[in-house]
Image (tube, rainbow, N blue to C red):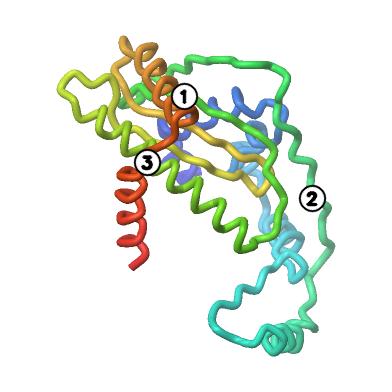
């Protein structure tokens, strides 16, 4: 309960409200991590053990091998070392996480959190995540998307540096939730009275990037930044 109290921040409450708005037909808003005060207070040790044994099992484990090695030899080694691993207790079926609501068009919501230290505006898109193998082609596509997000963030950062800037702390992100739903968003902090103007600015810059792309100089700049981060 102490951990629940310490995590009860404005940012967390805002995030929960966002999930209730964006993913109303999924489990995320209704089954938030850590549970409720009532469920925690009544949770016996046996229930924790049952949960652990049901989900932390060999058939749900992933072995990650990294390096320049012979794939056949490593596969045989993994099979030899882990073939006799057995789960404890009964396994559980994965629950239906629900679906992304796609028939409501463009919608908006203003959420007020009284103890929030700033006002944040964002434009987000949610879709079902693609189930694909982790191939070289998929990694290349992810790299292209990352570079695009970095270039758009750089543009917004430059706009936020002006003395009369509408926004601050801009961000462009793409996140996949539990391998099921993908959220793509662009957002920034702003003064409450300037929230509509800030949203308009974000939309304008997003459309400009989608319709006209980026310059060679912008690509070279973020490529250098990415390489330095990987060095």
- The disc, 1 or 2, on the residue closer to the chain's N-terminal end is 2
Which residue is denoted by mark 2 in the rendering? Answer: 94
How busy is the neighbourhood of tag 1: few (under 14 within 10 Å), some, or many (20 plus)? Answer: few
Residues marked 3 and 2 touching at CB (< 8 Å): no
Residues marked 3 and 1 touching at CB (< 8 Å): no
Given residues 91 and 211, the one toward you in this image is 211
Q: Determine the secondary structure under disc 3.
A: helix
Residues marked 1 and 2 touching at CB (< 8 Å): no
Residue 118, picture quadrant: top left
Which residue is denoted by mark 3 in the rendering? Answer: 151
Q: Residue furthest left?
A: 163
Given residues 214 and 119, the one toward you in this image is 214
Q: CA–CA distance between discs 3 and 2? A: 38 Å
The residue under the point 76% across, 35% down is 98
Q: Residue furthest front?
A: 216
Quarter of the figure with the C terminus: bottom left
Q: Tell me residue 127's x, y (percent).
A: 66, 34
Q: Which mark is residue 207?
A: 1
Q: CA–CA distance between discs 3 and 1? A: 14 Å
How busy is the neighbourhood of tag 3: few (under 14 within 10 Å), some, or many (20 plus)? Answer: many
- The disc, 3 or 1, on the residue closer to the chain's N-terminal end is 3
Relative horizontal placement of residue 116, taking residue 70 as reference (left or right): left
Q: Tell me residue 65's x, y (percent).
A: 60, 77
The residue under the point 41% across, 20% down is 204
Relative height, residue 88 to residue 215 (above, below): below
């Amino acid at each position: 309960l102490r951990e629940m109290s310490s995590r009860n921040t404005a940012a967390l409450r805002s995030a929960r409200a966002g999930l209730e708005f964006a993913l109303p037909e999924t489990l995320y808003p209704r089954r938030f991590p850590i549970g409720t005060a009532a469920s925690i207070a009544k949770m016996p040790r046996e229930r924790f053990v049952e949960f652990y044994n049901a989900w932390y099992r060999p058939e749900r484990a992933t072995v990650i091998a990294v390096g320049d090695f012979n794939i056949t030899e490593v596969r045989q080694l993994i099979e030899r070392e882990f073939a006799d691993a057995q789960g404890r207790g009964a396994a559980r079926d994965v629950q239906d996480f629900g679906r992304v609501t796609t028939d409501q068009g463009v919608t908006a919501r203003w959420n007020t959190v009284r103890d929030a230290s700033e006002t944040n505006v964002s434009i987000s898109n949610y879709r079902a995540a693609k189930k694909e193998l982790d191939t070289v082609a998929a990694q290349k596509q992810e790299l292209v998307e990352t570079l695009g997000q970095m270039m758009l963030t750089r543009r917004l950062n430059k706009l936020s540096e002006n003395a009369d800037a509408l926004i601050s702390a801009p961000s462009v992100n793409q996140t996949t939730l539990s391998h099921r739903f993908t959220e793509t968003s662009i957002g920034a902090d702003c003064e409450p009275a300037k929230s509509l103007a800030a949203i308009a600015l974000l939309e304008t810059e997003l459309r400009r990037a989608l319709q006209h792309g980026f310059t060679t100089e912008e690509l070279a700049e973020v490529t250098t930044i990415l390489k330095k981060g990987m060095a």
